[in-house]
Amino acid sequence: MKRIISKLDIKGPNLVKGINLEGLRVLGEPSYFAKKYYENLSDEIIYHDCVASLYERKSFLDLIEKTSYDIFIPISVGGGIKSLKDIEKVLSAGADKVFINSAAIKKPKFLVDASKKFGSANICLSIEVIKDSNDEYICLSNYGREVSNKKLLPWIIEAQQLGVGEIILTSVSCDGIGNGFDQEILELIYDEIKVPFIIHGGAGNEKQIYDVLKYEKVSGVAISSLLHYSLIRDKNFKFESKGEGNTQFLKNYRDNTNFKKTSISSIKKYLKKKGISVRL
């Protein structure tokens, strides 16, 4: 069964979203969005603290705890996960699993240690990838801010050998655009995928989601902008932020034609008609 996952990027107290992981705009209170997505049949919530690695800000434990009381689907958390103690705190707050990027790139053995202590099913590798000037896919860290020495395909192979139970891959160049996922990436890595695999970055409508979920090894898609902007268009949407970050975008928001107004339940009904197995 394929998963439709709601991915929420968090900066301070607010839900934010940008383009290509840059230009973060405040959209509102994250737990409000998470609950709406849960009520609309999301299979999982991802919380990504998008500044934790850069500023060494600790994970947002209060938000995780609040959300775990309000929704009853898996919660995945990442951003600034640097130690086994960090993982323990996040799981104790109510998360079901964690995803790791920057710390794993710096010290791949961290994946081994984490998988042994908490179980591979609870440890996910997050990969942020972009094509460089040599036409090669390379991995980024710190929410796309730093170029690493990891090339995509060898890193996927290595990480699976180190014990990760799942991989979520973000195409940075497609993120926030709404023109579809980078299927060239899928074709490059497909034969080497051995664990549940989630793709993120580019969803603008139901067909684009179907175009990647029809690949057998793709376990699900993580969606951000398409869901956020659809919810914002709802006449009952109430904007609430806690005063940190760029709120001007939302105050002046106009429909972005790259993103169809839809919902998780509508996406799932479309997929089911196309023969994709989803939870309804």
Image (cartoon, rainbow, N blue to C red):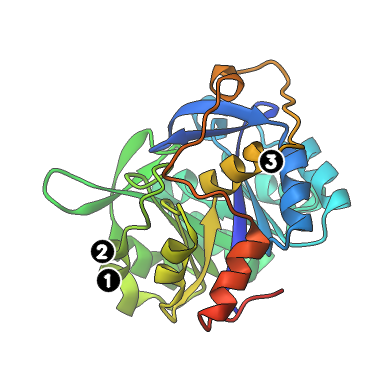
Q: Position of residue 127 (x, y in %)?
A: 42, 53
On the picture, is 151 further left or further right than 97?
A: left
**Mark 3 = which residue?**
234
Q: Residue at x 46, y 37 (%)?
A: 256
Looking at this view, is 78 or 119 the one in front?
78
**Mark 1 = which residue?**
187
* Mark 2–mark 1 CB contact (< 8 Å): yes
Looking at this view, is 204 or 254 the one in front?
254
The three-letter amino acid code for the residue at tag 1 is Glu
Q: Residues within 10 Å of mark 2 (few under 14, many from 20)?
A: few
Residue 180 seen in the figure = yes
Report, in whole angstroms, how far the alpha carbon at label 2 lies from the one at label 3.
34 Å
The three-letter amino acid code for the residue at tag 3 is Asp
Q: Residue at x 71, y 52 (%)?
A: 37
The three-letter amino acid code for the residue at tag 2 is Glu
Q: Secondary structure at mark 3?
A: loop
Looking at this view, is 126 or 217 the one in front?
217
Q: Residues within 10 Å of mark 3 (few under 14, many from 20)?
A: few
